[in-house]
Amino acid sequence: MLSALLVMSAIAAVLGAVLGFAAIKFHTEGNPLVDKIDDVLPQTQCGQCSYPGCKPYATAIAAGEADINRCPPGGEEGIRKLAELLGVEFKPFGEDAVPKAKSLAVIDESTCIGCTLCIQACPVDAIAGAAKQMHTVIASECTGCELCVAPCPVDCISMQVIGEKITNWKWKYPVYAMTATT
Amino acid sequence: MEISGICHDRNNMRPAVPVGNDNMRKLYHFHGGIHPPSNKTQSTRATIARAPLPAKLVIPLHQHAGETAKPVARVGERVLKGQLIGMPDGVVSSAVHASTSGTITAIDMQLIAHPSGLPNLCATLIPDGKEEWAPRKTIDYRDHSPAGLQHLLRMAGVVGLGGAAFPSDLKLSLDKHKITTLVLNGAECEPYITCDDMLMRERAAEIVQGAEMLRFMLDAEEVLIGIEDNKPEAIASMRAAVAAGGHQRMEVIAVPTVYPGGGAKQLIRVLTGIEVAAGVRSTDMGVQCFNVATAYTIHRAFAHGEPLLSRIVTITGNVMHPRNYEVLIGTPIAELVALGVALPDTDSYIMGGPMMGFPLPSVQVPLVKATNCIIASSKKIFPPPPPVMPCIRCTRCADVCPADLQPQDLFWFAQSREFGRAQAFNLFDCIECGACSYVCPSHIPLVQYYRFAKSEIHAREHDKQLADKARVRHDYREQRIEREKQEKADKLAAREKAAQAARLADAQPLTPQQQAEQAELETSRAHIRELAQSAVEHADEGTTK
Ligand code: SF4
Ligand code: SF4
Ligand code: SF4
Ligand code: SF4
């Protein structure tokens, strides 16, 4: 068990390095504040913030035109990050923007007619297929934005909640009755 | 799992000085450490026994750190002992084999030994009792390249048996690092666990030969075998094996008994004096560390052609007959418990030791490569911890932390979810040994907070990575759409230009009146074009705002 943790931290270090590398490699010229904001947005590209993607929302925030509590996929954690980044107060979600459990699009492959409309709708190129052929969602690339669901003429795309599995399980916050002395 | 009820005798924290130092070598100290009651003698009175063949084996395909092995056996297929049933999948992965001959009756999700209590993919094997082996190929390791040997280990399913179950082949691929010292870890510092002790007592020669194979693969110069001085029989047996085998530059060293002296960094420090700093790997400093049972398994793999099918497990705690057994991987833990005969007041079972183990979700879960010990637990042995009280910042935790951290600060950051600061305070150097919780006068389950914080940070890094990839794909898509639009527009413009040129070429000389008409037509066309253009712009704005 001792070395298990060393291994885990080594893996974490490697992942960290990868992130750092990606950030350097894919850095594009632009407004640094917009990029910084975009960096903490979840990149679901769902448009729930009423902007056509994360970057436009980041641009609007940077211009002072949008609130920081408009992105449901980012969760409260996301709002907290934005608040910290911009040095403003945390602001809870309004009633119109409520986070949901993270889910994945799944195509019922026996019903699909191969019309390619979902491919055109997917903002992150996570659907594979060609005209008149069965289409498939690449699960590891689907951000769960739901944009492919509506265009499908035969209603064969459904959103499935990602359940807790061994691979994504997390240790829970310890809950103890503190015998407070205050 | 944190047990706060074992012993609260803090006068027990004597300095870590070797008692009756018969080593020629100078030993070093690591920071902190504790001396919980060892409770090891109960299970070392009898020799290792072979557990009987169970009626059913459930073999998880994910027993190692990394990716789940891909099932390569079919339901209904008859398999031989040692036959591959799980193919390593990905860089960090390891093979899984049939532990005996029989029939695969299911490949599905089953409850496994994991703190989450969640199921994972397993192959169910009904033994036929014949123990019929698949062909075994023995090799002389000296005829092979280190890379070839690494591949053999991966396919033999050899993983670290000290508890981490990290694929051993990966610890041997070091490219540029020069390893001078191979440390063999026989410290076995955690209370109750005695599987390595008994293995060293009874099978020392094979461990030492395994160490020789590891030295060959690492191209290491010296081998240091560290064993805590509360295991004199194991030390004597290992020394005899080293002497009998005529192994040069291989030394068995008694190290002081102090928990967690079996942590890789801690043992390396004690034996070599090397302090492996935060974020640095021991291989950067020329040292690599393997558990003694792993060395034994490597010897079985090369010299006997046997993949990892069984291991030594301690059954102890609240049982009538504590003992070590050699058990097939996949054996239901209930069968092992039955051999030890659990006492009636047993209320749960712990896999691993009392400091770092975790309670099993069910006693029916199968034994895996990482199972070194099963402790039957009762209220008598492990009384429920006293109520948690606020931290009084006494810093006793910092005094005992073997990683030289400030556990009280880490606790504060973790419980207030300030993960960035926890990381800055070297949270990931914490080996979750539980020494801090053990001495905390406020009985705070500190390690649970560290585990929570670490897994939150891992999840966030994972999400961030996915988000960064999604951003790249999204940007690429935007660029592609833009490019396609541009290409279409260019084509259209080119076509129009060509048509106009053709019209001009065809045209007859015009009368002045015709010319005037033409000019008027052109102006109105230009005006219409302008209007149309501004409409498009408006439409665009409409969609983007
Ligand atoms: S709501 Fe959707 S599109 Fe808007 S910032 Fe969040 S993830 Fe991006
Ligand atoms: S939109 Fe529906 S029918 Fe069309 S390709 Fe996608 S899944 Fe198939
Ligand atoms: S030992 Fe417990 S009470 Fe003392 S400083 Fe550490 S966490 Fe706080
Ligand atoms: S902080 Fe981590 S390494 Fe230090 S004593 Fe506590 S559990 Fe052990």
Image (cartoon, grey):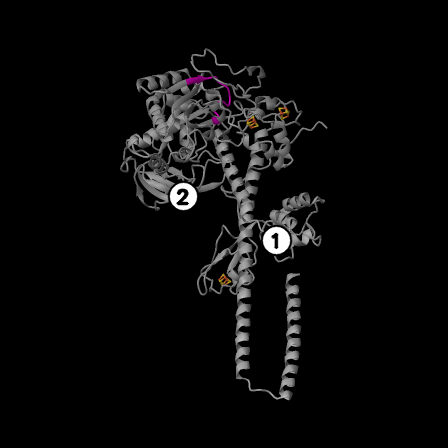
Amino acid type of the residue tagged 1 in the rendering:
Cys
Q: Is residue A169 left or right of residue B231?
A: right
Above or below, B124 against B191 in this view is below
Q: Which residues are magenta?
A: B253-264
Q: Is residue B327 left or right of residue B399?
A: left
Choose mark 1 or mark 2, whichever is in front. 1
Task: Give the number of marks.
Answer: 2
Q: Is residue B310 left or right of residue B140?
A: right
Prevailing secondary structure class for the magenta stretch in the rendered image = loop
- Residue at image coords 64%, 63%: B543
Front-most of residues B319 and B496: B496
* Position of residue B452 measured from the top left corner of the image (x, y, whole percent): 57, 36
CA neighbours of label 1 inside 10 A, class few (<14), some (14 to 19), many (20+)? many
Secondary structure type for disc 2: loop
CA neighbours of label 2 inside 10 A, class few (<14), some (14 to 19), many (20+)? some
Quadrant hosting residue B168: top left
Above or below, B273 against A143 in this view is above
Quadrant hosting residue B234: top left
Q: Which residue is mark 2?
A: B89
In magenta segment, residue B258? yes
Amino acid type of the residue tagged 2 in the rendering:
Asp
Q: Which residue is mark 1?
A: A54
Q: Disc 1 versus disc 2: distance between alpha carbons?
A: 35 Å
- The answer to whether residue B296 is seen in the rendering is no
Read off the chain for label 2: B
Read off the chain for label 1: A
